[in-house]
Amino acid sequence: MSGVVEQAVDGPRYDFRSAEPKWQAAWDARGCFKAQDVPTSGRKKYYVLEMFPYPSGKIHMGHVRNYTLGDVVARYKRACGFDVMHPMGWDAFGLPAENAARERGVHPAKWTWENIANMRAELQRMGLSLDWAREFATCDPSYYGHQQKLFLDFLQAGLVERQESWVNWDPVDGTVLANEQVIDGRGWRSGALVEKRKLSTWVFRITKFAPALLSALDGLDRWPERVRLMQANWIGRSEGARVRFPMAGTEGEVEVFTTRPDTLFGMSFIAVAPEHPLAAAAAAANPAAAEFVAECRRMGTSEAVIETAEKRGIDTGFRVAHPFIPGATFPVWIANFVLMEYGTGAIFGCPAHDQRDLDFARKYALPVTPVVLPTGEAAASFSVADKAFDGDGVIINSGFLDGLSAPKAAKSAAIARLEEIGAGQGVVNWRLRDWGVSRQRYWGCPIPIIHCEACGVVPVPDDQLPLELPQDVTFDRPGNPLDHHPTWKHVNCPKCGAAARRETDTFDTFVDSSWYFARFCSPGDKAPVLRAAVDHWLPVDQYIGGIEHAILHLLYSRFFTRAMKATGHVSVEEPFAGLFTQGMVTHESYKSADGAWLYPEEIEFGADGTAVQRQTGAPVTVGRVEAMSKSKRNTVDPGAIIARFGADTARWFILSDNPPERDMQWTESGVLGAYRFTQRLFRLVEALGDAGRGAEPETFSVAARRLRRATHRTIIGVTQALEDFAFNVAVARIYEFSNAIAEAERNGDDDGMAWARREALEMAARLVAPMMPHLAEEAFALMGGSGLVAELSWPIGDAALAAAETVTIAVQVMGKLRGTVETAPDAGEAATVAMAEAHPNVAAGLVGKRIVKRIYVPGRIVNFVVAG
RNA sequence: GCCCGCCUGGCGGAAUGGUAGACGCAGCGGACUUAAAAUCCGCAGCCGGUAACGGCGUGGGGGUUCAAGUCCCCCGGUGGGCACCA
């Protein structure tokens, strides 16, 4: 492995170390990648955006992949004549900065800004075609001040409100925990048992837009289908009914939401969430119920945890009447699998037709009454054992619903009756909840609100924005440093002047990333956005990022855009017209004999292919290929790769390995292969020398024509591959092309060959430019090209020159390949079929058979269907 | 538990329903070299056969079709998301 690199040090043909900074400076000097806020060029706009990074300190391979993909698109579209905007910034608020402050005593601001400086330098070494003049960080008051203004506008428009919500509370650290910070019911840092706690929080009313966010998904035809599906499921529209059950013996009622009102006669019990008021009432009266509710409270708020936990419950002792069955009463249970946030926080249990209800009923010996009969079953013999029936069928045991088909007809009949007798109504329920944005953290955008005893919630006046974070905070005790600050929260009410209290919560960092794409259009403007700029540039034409953001970030941004439209900031409703989601970067993992994870650079492979530790020669176990992570130490530092092989090699390899939407495996050998190709291409250019200058020859030899065909086929093929986001295919086409050029070189200089080679190499340089921009410039300059490849227009392939002189037709008998025949591209059906039938191997297969049918697909295939 | 994705040679992958395995990596053979590295040329799915060629083959099973990696149904394996990480 070292040989390749050492050669590069000794005397490379292509010296990326000098070339890459040189061309980066040249692009910068020409301002190649600058865009205007409100362009005057008249060219069609194209806004390319990659999800901006969190400034963790160093770029990782995921970033390299993300920004390389975006850069290929940006450079390609620019060459195609679009006016491209391609900005970069920093998603700079968030918990890691605060963790660093607690662990190492460094101020979050200092930590963040140093990380940004470091990462900016690393990104710049990648040679990305970014307009750095648009850069900003979300932790800068000149950004988040505008965000505060947007929040106040949303508040005014009724898109923000105060709500109580349940959170994971760490009683020792005195802080709210994310679900991922709750491990086996304990806080990750303190180890204390986590409790659910109710908190008063600010929410964005995203549910107001639920129908719009759902229906607009249909129009996002340049989004991956699966992302649209994930969002649709997340929004979760379901049609059903709210049903009210009067309490037996006391006042009051329980309201449930159900999607299956057709199965109401199969009801066995009611179950309420542990946070439901009835559960609280039961707990007050019954110590066992109180104990159960307390236990559920320790379970955390994660849906995955709740739904995989053992189904448990306790009878409250309350009984309800049934709206359709006079005289019947049913027990009300508290169950740990009922979610307070969904529907009404209460369900009716129909064990025969819902698996979860069935498991629960069996556990607590509650009755199971089938009310939907599967087709083909007899009512007398049908019963439910341990598998609930949730398919279609006919209603039985259900009074006025009997005989109706379930669920559809019976559902409408049940709803009609509920409405008639005033016991409920048909409703559309949404799974989507309002977006809680309050965080009890320091390193986030302050929520610009003042709480006044007399005036209530008072917005911070516009002329006091941005409301800046105080710098002098300490992290020496648990809880929110803003809350501990001696003076910051004490303020006079802007309305009445009395002593009042600032809101000390800050925004969820998803707020920061929900409108940054709009701010990029006019990053220096005094208002959150410059209307003319966003009207021109939005929506983003191509957005690129990780699939992990498929739901939250993208949905929040879609909401924000609608909210900004409602408050007059933008005209569009959808922020991202095109979306591409990339796969992860993975690597083998390595473990030493004592079980410690080892970094790839600590490993060496022996002649027999086994891995050993480089220093000691101790054996190493090669583990699974998985997502690069610091804990597994299977990371590769892009900075080191770029220093050793150059940015173009890193970019080329990351594009060549596999389709960008799939996970890719980073391998040393793959990088070396990419590096070798940079040298190979450059050698081909060097070997050309001065050959082929001058006017296009009158005639070309057969070999020269073959090369020109390869050239024009490659232009067409690479163009199509780039349009399709099939960058690995584009790379493969260029490899094929370089093989064709090398072959032509060996064929000597017959008629027109030198000219054809020059044409081929010039096109090669221009076609690799979006992927390996530095090498492209260096090669182009060496060939005597004038100007920058970055400023050239995209080449157009000549279809006539690319056309094949003969085509190969596959010949099948009964769908099995029996041979191939060469024909002229315009040979007709009769001639082609005759030639196919005459093929010796085909003829042998046809002996003694009767040809029933001859299938002919022009340019592709002849298939004989035979009998006998 | 619910939702979503993925599965093709030793490896990454290519393939408008039309010659499965392009291209690359690793491997093998050759040229060059005192030698090695680098470079260049060639071979290569698996089984059988000197070969011509034949059989098998895209996670497993079934179906549609003249023709299925591709479309449909069932099953298996594996990865991701599930609301305060970003």
Image (cartoon, helix red, strand yellow):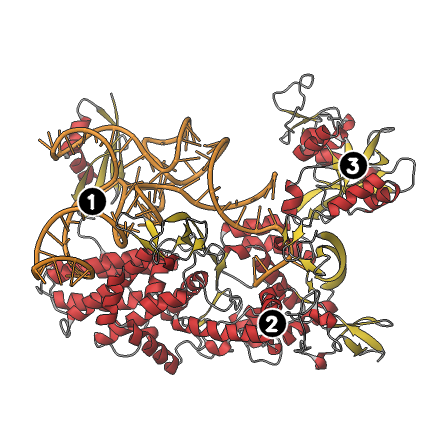
Along the line of sight, the residue nearer the viewer: A646 or A803: A646
Residue drawn 15% across the image and 73% down it: A689
Residue drawn 34% across the image and 77% down it: A21
Residue density around tag 2, few if under 14, some if 14–19, many if 20 or more, within 10 Å = some
* Real-space Cα separation, disc 2 to disc 3, in angstroms: 48 Å
Q: Is label 2 or label 3 in front? A: 2
The residue singled out by tag 1 in the image is: A808
Left or right: A524, with A595 as reference point: right
The residue singled out by tag 2 in the image is: A105
Among the two numbered marks 2 and 3 on one chain, the one whose residue lies closer to the N terminus: 2
Q: Are marks 1 and 3 on the same chain?
A: yes
Residue type, mark 1 in image: Thr
Residue density around tag 1, few if under 14, some if 14–19, many if 20 or more, within 10 Å = some
Along the line of sight, the residue nearer the viewer: A322 or A288: A288
Q: Is label 1 or label 2 in front? A: 2
Query: Label 2 is found on which chain of the structure?
Result: A
Where, quadrant-wise, is the N terminus of chain A in this rendering? bottom left
Residue drawn 58% across the image and 69% down it: A104
Element at label 1: strand
Element at label 2: loop
Residue density around tag 3, few if under 14, some if 14–19, many if 20 or more, within 10 Å = some
Residue type, mark 2 in image: Gly
> Is A179 rendered above or below residue A354?
below
The residue singled out by tag 3 in the image is: A314
Which mark identifies residue A316? none
Along the line of sight, the residue nearer the viewer: A372 or A342: A342
Residue type, mark 3 in image: Ile
Residue drawn 80% across the image and 41% down it: A424
Query: Label 3 is found on which chain of the structure?
Result: A
Q: Are marks 2 and 3 on the same chain?
A: yes
